[in-house]
Amino acid sequence: MKRNVLYVLAMATTLVACTDDYTDWAKPIANQQEEAKSTSMALTPAALIDYAALTGDNVQLFTAAVTAEGEYATSYDVQFSNGTVLKANGNGEVSVAELEKVLIDINGKRPVEHEYPISVAGYIALGDMTVKHTADLKITAKLYSPYVIEDTYYLVQQVGGVWDFANARELSHSGNDVYDDPQFTAYVAAPLKADESCDDWYFAIATKAVKESKDEAALLGVAADGDAALEGSLTEAGKVIKIPATAGTKNFGLSLNMAERSYKVERLVFDELMFVPNNGQAWALATAPALQSADFKGVYTGFANLDGGFQLAETRVAGKGKTYVFADFKEVDDTVMKKDASGNLSVVAAGFYMMKADIPAQTIELTKTAWGIVGDAPGSWDEDKEMTYDAAKDAWVATVDMVKGSFKFRANKSWDVVNYGGSIDNLQAGAADLKVDEEGTYQVELYLTRSTSDKIYCTLTKQ
């Protein structure tokens, strides 16, 4: 037999019965009605939740004043603005670790006070029946970081025992909030002695204020002067970090994690760029296309217009560095490349090629490409405005009517090969859409080969 129970609530409630069956309240009730009962719930948000002061596994979000007749138990579901729901116990407490994840997802890791609106569903269990109350409130919380993280850091090198603040280098960063991404990086050419053999490398880290004040005593370095470890902890008023010379090292990769105040140095045996002198440009190193290994690990990518033989060269200086030819690669696609009479690599068919040379793995890949402009600015995200290769400019060119909007460059009328966006003076593969702010006819030129610049870029000239 079904029982119908009526609750008189002090605030808006939802009745959760022991059955999901529908009851028509307009019909006469044949069953004996139980005595009416009342419940209420009032929530008060906790004071500032400061993660610097938390010690236990749980933290209180709110206190609850609950009234109910007879014995009861309470529990709570707490929903945040990002949709996450956390379970709170009868004291209004949730897991410290789970709450931290939610707060980071909403406002990031920066340790400043934020208000977080929450919706609380409170459940009052009375025997085999449960009453649901709801309430909206705001909690205030502040996350914790053991260190203050600056927006900018500089690499300061020591030359001849003197700190070279004048040539301090700003470390690279993603541009995201530094508390969410505390990684800073730099690539530095290994110092050389007069005879061009490797020399020791001495450095420390400076904030912007320290760089400007040239305060050597405030540099971030290591605890022991001349510590030669490739990784370790940074300390304020630190001593110089010394990386001993090692034959074959061409560059150093430096990475900092400023949330932990740690550093790591990698010895790198490759340079950033490799050059492609070829038959089509009379083997001129000075104007040869350049491939890039952005992480200096020896996997080079880029573009070159090829017609016949070509090589890969480590430098633009004739007679210096290694030159890579057909015999230096163990995997070569013979439908695209072959060995010419001089032992060089050679393309089977002339064309503008996307190149990938993995020097450590001794592999090389070539993909023939043609380029176009696509987007709502030139008229469609589905159909490309075709570009033409201009050998004199070593660029892909087109005259295009544009409206205010977005566009990208892509190869072979497909998103599956490669596309470029980002900034017009430093295009990046797969980056954000480029923008046109003013309607008009534009001369568009796309420079992919790095023959005259270390960057891939484009120009837009309104006609």
Image (tube, helix red, strand yellow):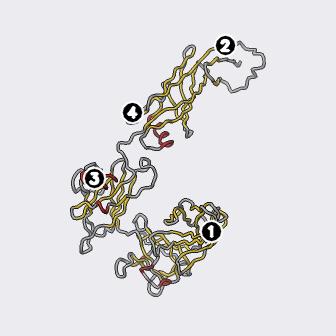
Above or below residue 32? Residue 164 is below
Amino acid type of the residue that numbered disc 4 sits on in the rendered structure = Leu
Please, what is the three-letter code of the amino acid marked with disc 1?
A: Lys
Which sits in the foreground, 146 or 406? 406
Disc 4 to disc 1: CB gap under 8 Å: no
Q: Nearer the viewer, mark 1 or mark 2?
A: 1
Give SS at disc 3. loop
Q: Residue at the spot x=69%, y=18% of the render?
A: 4
User: Secondary structure beneath disc 1?
Assistant: loop
Type of amino acid at the residue the image marks with label 3: Leu
Note whether residue 436 is visible. Answer: yes
Give the residue displayed 58% in from the left and 74% down from the top: 397
Secondary structure of the residue carrying numbered label 4: loop
C-alpha distance separating marks 4 and 3: 32 Å
Task: Identify the residue at horizontal 62%, vertical 19% (top origin).
Answer: 9
- Tell me which corner region of the image, top left, top right, bottom left or bottom right, holds residue 100: top left
Local packing at callout 3 (Cα closer than 10 Å; few below 14, some 14-19, many 20+) is many
Task: Check disc 1 and report the residue beneath it.
Answer: 413
Is 106 situated left or right of 239 in this image?
A: right
